[in-house]
Amino acid sequence: MFRRSFCFLLFAGFCLGCAQVGSPSGGPRDKNPPQLLESDPPNYSIRFEAKKIQITFDEYIVLESVNQELIVSPPMEEQPEVKLRKKTLIIEFEEELKENTTYTFNFGNAIKDLHEGNKLQNFEYVFSTGDILDSLSVKGTLRYAETLKKPKEAISIMLYSDLRDSVPLTEIPMYVGRSDDSGVFSVNNLRPGEYKVFALKDGNNNFLFDLPSEEIAFLDTSLTVNTDFVMQLLGIEALDSIAMPVDTSSRTASDTIPDLGPDLTSVYIDLMLFTEPSDIQYLSDYMREDRRKLLTVFALPLSDSFQYDFLLEEGEEISFLEDFSDLRDSLTLWVIDSLHYKKDSLWMALKYTVKDTAEKYVSQHDTLIFTYKEQTSKKRKKSTSVSVEKLELTTIRKRGFQDLHHKLGLTLNFPLEKITDSLISLYHIPDSVQLPVPFEVEADSVLLNRALLSVNWESAANYRLEILPGALASIYPLEHDTIDVSFETRDTEYYGQILLKLTNVNHRVLVQLLSKQKVISVREVDADGQYVFPNLSPREYTFKFIHDLNENGRWDTGEYLEKRQPEPVEFLPGNIEVRSNWDHDVSMILQK
């Protein structure tokens, strides 16, 4: 008995001991990115002569899109080969290094740990082939010129010591950096000098501004990068009381520059990103979503040289309605006669002016085939009844709310041809009695398929609208159903208004009132003062201010070779929560 108990205790003790071996399950998730342990040669080395770099981290890592993420500054003609061996990153050079040059290898978001995927963002390995490790920087923020939003994707920041205007078109930069997902950038380890500075969304990854769709930003003048210039910007006259950064040539792999006072090694700038206006005309799309409707879309507004013809059998004629867009960059043709729109294919010849490779304007000829095939569902195949096509008429929803300060829209799915107002009735219902209301109805001057009903609306009143078949006729012999809707107008106290006080208006400014990024109204302003924006529905608004320097009534982008920046844009800080029956006072001091 004693022996059996003793054996059991030994066995239990053995099991408990075994249970303590290994990693505990469950624990907090590792959120830390890989950490650098050592590198050979050491990071921030001088007199660098190695052909290979080995960088070891404290855990197993993986590389993600390293060929796209890795930026070498100054750029190399041959991208170095990057390999991975367990916890060690290996870099091998494919070309000879330049003499007396500081190189920066920025890995962007390429390095992350194996198990949790924590990214080591913007890790840099730096060395110099000379006796000096350059330590100056250009830092700043990148925004889109038209919206002031920060780009989420990485944008190349390029510095040139060659100050000719043509360098971004013909030469690769001397130094390269990149912006992060908040638009912040830093180009580090620069030697003192004077530079041209650009940002480029590089469409073909060749560090050249050579595609019309590439987005660019540039400084108007060259940028001086040296300690004396930074001191001048900061208003510092002497260095007696200012601690300078430590000598970077003696740093180890884990060293960083301590914060010892004013940053005398960095120049800070802001860049505005834009796409240049294109003068390359081309047909961007064409379609036939309805068998009656032929749409062509162009990259630029069409000139007077634009011509088109249907390709028909000899003696055939085709009738159609022509509808150009406001900017004249698209054309919709509504084929009227059924003999032609019932055809599955319609052929059209186009002629328009384009610019050729020699920068000369020539005539472009295109032949388009507009095809349409009727969609038939299984349900329709089983049905024996013939469906009659109706004209679709839409207006305010039943029991909806009509704005006191707007006309009531009547919209068709095809272009409007005729209005018979005697078939339209509008009633005011103060109690249970329906009182006829006078109105005027006319075709919309902008949209071919819409009519507008003008009424002196009463506040918070009940109305009934009746539209009988035939009231609105389209260019096709179709008839709409009867429309009978009841609705209510808004109360006058439903609306609020904004009183905007503007200061420092030195030229034409376009004031845009926005709600959910949609333009509600636009004012042209030439002087300081208070401007009233009345009859606003209760919701959030903000203001956008466009400095219309050429006074053409719109925002204009920039052009690099013309040395023209995009027109400046400002936004009112924060939003305005408009409340019913309330005046909201807002002030804005515009920048000069």
Image (tube, grey):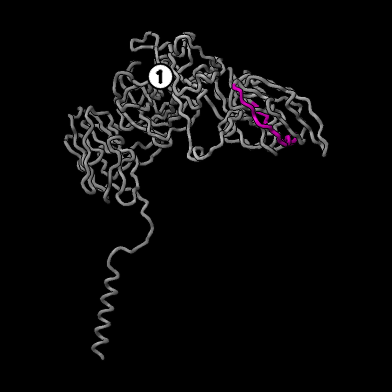
> Residue, x 56% and y 15% (percent of image)?
551
553 sits left or right of 159 in the view: right
> Residue, x 23% and y 88% (percent of image)?
3
- Residue 569 visible in the current orientation: yes
In this rendered view, identify the residue nearer to me: 499 or 472.
472
- Above or below, comparing residue 103 to residue 440 in the picture: below
> Residue, x 29% and y 35% (percent of image)?
70
Quarter of the image where one finds residue 429: top right
Q: Magenta stretch: residue 558 in it?
A: no
> Residue, x 40% and y 25% (percent of image)?
215
99 sits left or right of 268 in the view: left
Q: Which residues are magenta?
A: 476-501
- Residue 559 visible in the current orientation: no
Q: Which residue is mark 1?
A: 221
- Above or below, comparing residue 567 to residue 4 in the picture: above
How many marks overall? 1
Mark 1, residues whose alpha carbon is within 10 Å: few (<14), some, or many (≥20)? few
In this rendered view, identify the residue nearer to me: 8 or 563.
8
Image spot of residue 472 (x, y percent): 66, 24
Q: In what element is the residue under mark 1? A: loop
In this rendered view, identify the residue nearer to me: 199 or 161.
199
Residue at the front extreme of this rendering: 384
| Quarter of the picture holding the C terminus | top right
Image spot of residue 166 (x, y percent): 33, 16
Image spot of residue 321 (x, y percent): 56, 16
544 sits left or right of 344 in the view: right
Image spot of residue 450 (x, y percent): 63, 24
Quarter of the image where one finds residue 415: top right
Callout 1 amino acid: Thr
